[in-house]
Each structure stands twice: as structure tokens, then as C-alpha cells.
Amino acid sequence: GAVVSQHPSWVICKSGTSVKIECRSLDFQATTMFWYRQFPKQSLMLMATSNEGSKATYEQGVEKDKFLINHASLTLSTLTVTSAHPEDSSFYICSARWTENSPLHFGNGTRLTVT
Amino acid sequence: GENVEQHPSTLSVQEGDSAVIKCTYSDSASNYFPWYKQELGKGPQLIIDIRSNVGEKKDQRIAVTLNKTAKHFSLHITETQPEDSAVYFCAASRGLMDTDKLIFGTGTRLQVFP
């Protein structure tokens, strides 16, 4: 079945630094990937839609200059949290779909802690 | 926009009993309803989904029912096992080709006691 790999699984960084999270579709090509954010004991909130070869589409309230998304290939999308602050600490999860009419499959998430 | 409500927020059952989680949605144009299971520290895993042209779908111990008129759908787990313990999320969107607008419910923490 479709597998979405996310790396790293957890990261701790200092306030003011940047962190890059990778999302890979291992056995399929994903023209579109999605990035979600999840706070403890809360639901998933869509941050942005990552489109291969074009700019990401951000949801209302998500700062595009803070959360940089790059979808350089059909199997890789990256999310970079720039100038991270403690309030950016969260669980970030990517997802992808195999084809345009297939379900979303999620990665295992990245727990970011900003100290 | 779409709003998905999910109940209950927590559910405790004895092993072997059934568990039912209910969701309601607001957008009558929604026609795709997946359910995800999330274990601690992991990403959500798709367990079953249903489209609006179907009223019920079953996969072994898991079933989902959909009432389009009432705009609600439910997850049914029979013969629950301790490994079913997790957080379950329902979601809704206007279609598989519009999964970028997948709206999630608030989640249900299911605990199955041996």
C-alpha cells in the first residue's frame, strides 16, 4: 500500500533557528502533498497544500514566510519552520494521495520542540 | 465552510463490546467521509472511508454508516480489542479529488479495557 515517510520523527531546536521537515512518498508519485499541524489532544489543522513544481497554497492564518514549503519532485515535499519560536512547538504531519481519486495517506509526523 | 462535529470525545468500553463514534457535518455538498485511527506519537492511519452514494460500508470488525439527509455518519467497531485503543478522527470533504479540503472532527479517544 501507499507509504508516506516523514523525517525527522522528532526535533528539538533553539528559538530563532530554522528546522526542515521532509515528507516523501515512497512507492508512488504525489503531485500534491498536504501539511497539517496538530496540537496536543486536538484535531488536525490543514496548513498548506504543496503542489509539485509550483507555489504552495496556504490556509488562512498560516504565515507563508514562516512556514516555507517546497515540493521539488513528485516524491518529496519539505516544510521549513523559519525563525522558530516556542509557540511553533507542535506535531507536524504531512500527507499525500496516490492518485487524484485515492484517499489521503499520512506520514508518522514530526514532533517539533522549540526551546 | 464545512464544520465537522464528533462525539463522544472519550469512550471506554470493555473488550468484546462494540464502540460507536458519531460525526455530523454541515456542508451538504460533502460526499467523501474517511475515518482515521491515530496511535500515540504517530500519524493518522486510514481505516475506512465512504462516499455519499453508499449508505453503509463494512470491513471485518469496522463499519461506517452514512445518513445524508441528517448529515451524519458513524463508525462502528465490533468485538473491540485492546489494540483498538487509539484516537479516532472522522473527516469530510467534497470529494476524493478535493481532499485538500478534508475537514477533521475533534477526535474520540477510545479505550478498550481487557
Image (cartoon, coloured by chain):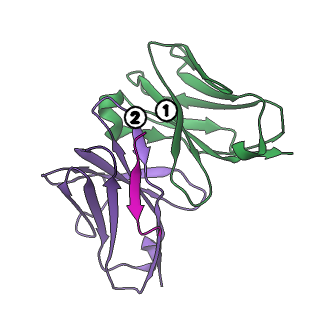
Chain colours: A purple, B green
Q: Around disc 2, counting alpha carbons within 10 Å, would you say few (fewer than 14), some (14 to 19), or many (20 or more)?
A: many
Which amino acid, mark 2? Answer: Pro
Please provide percent x and percent y for residue B40. 62, 58
Q: Nearer the viewer, residue B1 or B8?
A: B8
Q: In which quarter of the view is residue B81 placed?
A: top right
- Residue A3 in the magenta stretch? The answer is yes
Tell me which residue sits at (42%, 21%) in the image.
B28
What is the x, y in percent for residue A76? 26, 57
Any magenta on residue B90? Answer: no
| Separation of residues labelled 1 and 2 (CA atoms) | 8 Å
Question: Which residue does the numbered mark 1 point to in the structure image?
Answer: B34
Type of amino acid at the residue the image marks with label 1: Pro
Indicate which disc residue A103 carries: 2
Q: Which residues are magenta?
A: A1-9
Q: Quadrant of the N terminus of chain A?
A: top left
- Residue at image location 38% in from the left, 35% down from the top: B1
Q: Is residue A46 above or below residue A23?
A: above
Category of crowding for the residue at label 1, using alpha-carbon neighbours closer than 10 angstroms: few (below 14), some (14–19), many (at least 20):
many
Residue A58 got which mark?
Answer: none
In contact (CB < 8 Å): disc 1 and disc 2: yes
Q: Nearer the viewer, residue A23 or B103?
A: A23
Q: Of residues A115 and B42, which is closer to you in this image?
A: B42
Judged from the image, the secondary structure of the residue bearing numbered disc 2 is loop
Q: Height in image: B14 above or below B71?
A: below
